[in-house]
Image (cartoon, grey):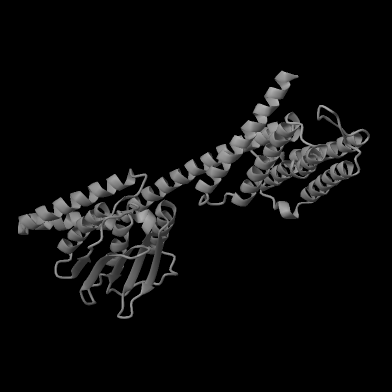
Amino acid sequence: MMLGFDFWAAAEASAVLFGIFGLILVFLARDIDRWPARLCIAILSSALLSAALALLKRAAAQNQVSHSLFRALLCAEALITPLPSLLVFAYFLQCCGENYLKSAAMRIQCALTAALIAAQWLAHLTGAVSITPDYATRAGRWSYVYVVIISALTVNCLIALFLRRKRVTGAQFVMFLVCFFAVDVIQIILVELYLMAELVRRYLMQRDEAAQQRTRAAVAQMRPHFIYNTLMNVYYLCAKDPPRAQRIIRDFTRYLQNNFTAIAQEDTIPFEKELEHTRAYLAVEQACFEGRLFVEFDTPDTFFRIPPLTLQPIVENAVKHGMDPDLEPLYVSVVTRDTARGVKITVEDTGPGFAPTDDDEPNYALKNIRERLKTMCGGTLEIEEREAGGTRVTIFIPQDEGK
């Protein structure tokens, strides 16, 4: 008996610890897309409370509290203990891609759970459940009612699992199958372990997706015609103006080096690095469009971090869509300002601009940058037309993320 007591006490304590750790993980990973955070928090919270009540009831029995206080704990346990199983069933339906709020199986499960809670409360309030001197409980004839309802709950779970077995992965099927048969404490630990593993998996998937976005952005912005035009300009300048050709080669090499370095980056980088990349790109373009492209940098605030390939693609879009031989020379400005809430970066150009609703390359690049800003540093990106003509793109990096 002592061995069994030690085992269940350890299991209940483990469930409490797993619940606390799981809730911490959920709050840390709250920005993960498409994760049912509210349902996850509800499962972990109810499981944590259920395990804590079991520990409290065990401690109350050891200290031989009054029977009325012990019965109050039993009533609280009767109310809380069925909730994790009900929420796990809701999570199962969620994994199947089903709206559990409208599911007939979920309605049956809710009705049976309510019947179980009502039966346990009625038994306790009427005194049908007796408490022995060693603080064990005896439900008498009510135990048959409990068995019938719990059996119905299990059967409903198994039928739902069988009918939806093709909608879940093999690991999910095994986990839910074991949970539907396991006792409460073991069920709690299994679900919490699975939820924490799922959080880690989704975090890794999101990180890989962010890396792929950076790679796509780097490849997309290295336009073949830009490389071709640069090399052809160098080819002709080698005979006419060798020093200028050397400068273009130097800046173009720095531009390519920064691009390849950015692809390998998995975190934000100092803004100065991104600014250096942007300067190298603009130096190449200014050499190719001599007298047609003018650039102004007003960047007194550079001590913050930013996702790689953020500023340079925005400036490249400004040049690509703003440079027109039939129009006036293009002016591009890059400005940084440190505000009370964070850092603001503004890129303006005097070109004809483009409509923000167009489904073309610049908007794809801006969408990519906007997603990476939100994911990696909680930043935002806005695009608008200038009153004097041209386009203005504004990036905002929150103070606690940018510094």
Instruction: Report x, y in % for residue 132.
Output: 86, 29
Please state if 84 lies on the left or on the right of 215 as rendered.
right
Quarter of the image with the N terminus is top right
| Residue 127 or residue 77, whichever sits in front | 127
Please state if 317 lies on the left or on the right of 363 as rendered.
left
Please state if 363 lies on the left or on the right of 192 as rendered.
left
- Residue 247, placed above or below residue 13: below
Instruction: Report x, y in % for residue 366.
Output: 39, 61
- Residue 140, placed above or below residue 215: above
| Residue 263 or residue 89, whichever sits in front | 89
Q: How many marks?
A: 0
Residue 177 shows up from this direction:
no
Instruction: Report x, y in % for residue 384.
Output: 38, 72
Q: Residue furthest right?
A: 141
The part of the image, by quadrant, that contains residue 18 is: top right
The part of the image, by quadrant, that contains residue 388 is: bottom left
Instruction: Report x, y in % for residue 149.
Output: 86, 40
Residue under the point 66% across and 29% down? 11
- Residue 66, placed above or below residue 397: above
The part of the image, by quadrant, that contains residue 133 is: top right
Q: Residue furthest bottom?
A: 388
| Residue 324 or residue 49, whichever sits in front | 49
- Residue 363, placed above or below residue 160: below
Residue under the point 28% across and 45% down? 261
Residue 349 shows up from this direction:
yes
Please state if 253 lies on the left or on the right of 89 as rendered.
left
